[in-house]
Image (cartoon, rainbow, N blue to C red):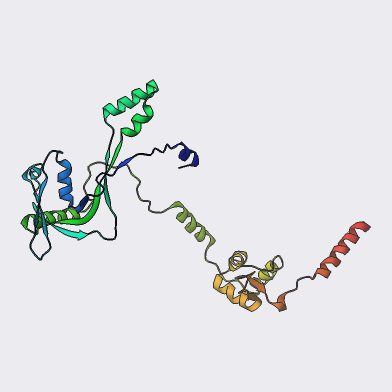
Amino acid sequence: MSKDEKDKVQIIDKELDLSNAGRGVWLVKVPKYIAQKWEKAPSNMDVGKLRISKTPGQKAQVSLSLTPAVLALDPDEKIPTEHVLDVSQVTKQTLGVFSHMAPTEATTAAANNGKENGSAAASATPDSEKLYMEGRIVQKLECRPIADTCYMKLKLESIRKASEPQRRVQPIDKIVQNYKPVKDHAHNIEYRERKKAEGKKARDDKNAVMDMLFHAFEKHQYYNIKDLVKITNQPISYLKEILKDVCDYNMKNPHKNMWELKKEYRHYKTEEQKDEEKTKSDGSSDSD
């Protein structure tokens, strides 16, 4: 979000109803099949019965039983009805439950009318949306089914569905217009034809190769092996044998991995010789 968009966002302070902040509530984690059933159930339906049995000197036992009305929402789907809730205390966290009441159609219409008339619009909008704190979470419970025959069948069915492949091979009765694999690409064919036209590199006489190398090093002081292969058109292994006799291989920067003539084969002109030749050429041009 850009800075201009942030400036355009209207921040409205709303009141939070904390009348139930001191109430302790439970946070219950239920299996997916129970959550799906409860989502389908109407708001006025009893979805389950909670039982708490206390034995002196022992921890309280909590159990949940689904009502027949919930099971009747989808009679073909068989799910476990009896569940045990494992209780754990919330000690190192502060968790709360909040509710949000959306504005009703009547309140929204009243706010819109107030905007049109230019009165009571500012007060109608904040009051139409309510925020409540329903309580503070004091215990966490995890709902797990009793391992009976119904639960085992449900797990077996879920494992079977998970093991089914997502993609299946099926025969087709018509041609599908799609990209087909290419046997060989054009650039590969061109490369092979070029290599075939060049033919296998034959070894020339060593003296002839050395003459080509000396002629090349008259133009530049350093060469890499690829450039020398192109210049001489010799096999790289044969060329390296000759280079080891007449050249040095640089292992350090600034000319790393490049070849240079050995000192006994170098005959580079010094700066004084270059200046003398330049002077002579300038003098001859003046006399003309």
Name the image quarter holding residue 208.
bottom right
* The one of 9 and 252 positioned closer to us in this rendering: 9
The percent position of residue 84, horizontal first and vertical second, equals 12, 57
* The one of 93 and 179 positioned closer to us in this rendering: 93
Numbered marks: total:
0
Name the image quarter holding residue 119.
top left
* Left or right side of 40 for 205: right
* The one of 36 and 237 positioned closer to us in this rendering: 36
* Left or right side of 132 for 215: right
Tell me which residue sits at (47%, 58%) in the image.
Answer: 192
* Left or right side of 170 for 70: left
Tell me which residue sits at (46%, 36%) in the image.
Answer: 8
Residue farthest to the right, as pictured:
287
The percent position of residue 284, horizontal first and vertical second, equals 90, 60
Tell me which residue sits at (25%, 51%) in the image.
Answer: 136
- Give the vertical position of 223 relative to 16 (above or below): below
If the image is split into quadrants, where does the N terminus sit? top left
Residue farthest to the top, as pictured:
117
If the image is split into quadrants, where does the C terminus sit? bottom right
* Left or right side of 169 for 189: right
The percent position of residue 96, horizontal first and vertical second, equals 27, 50
* The one of 154 and 137 positioned closer to us in this rendering: 137
The percent position of residue 108, horizontal first and vertical second, equals 31, 28
- Give the vertical position of 133 relative to 125 (above or below): below
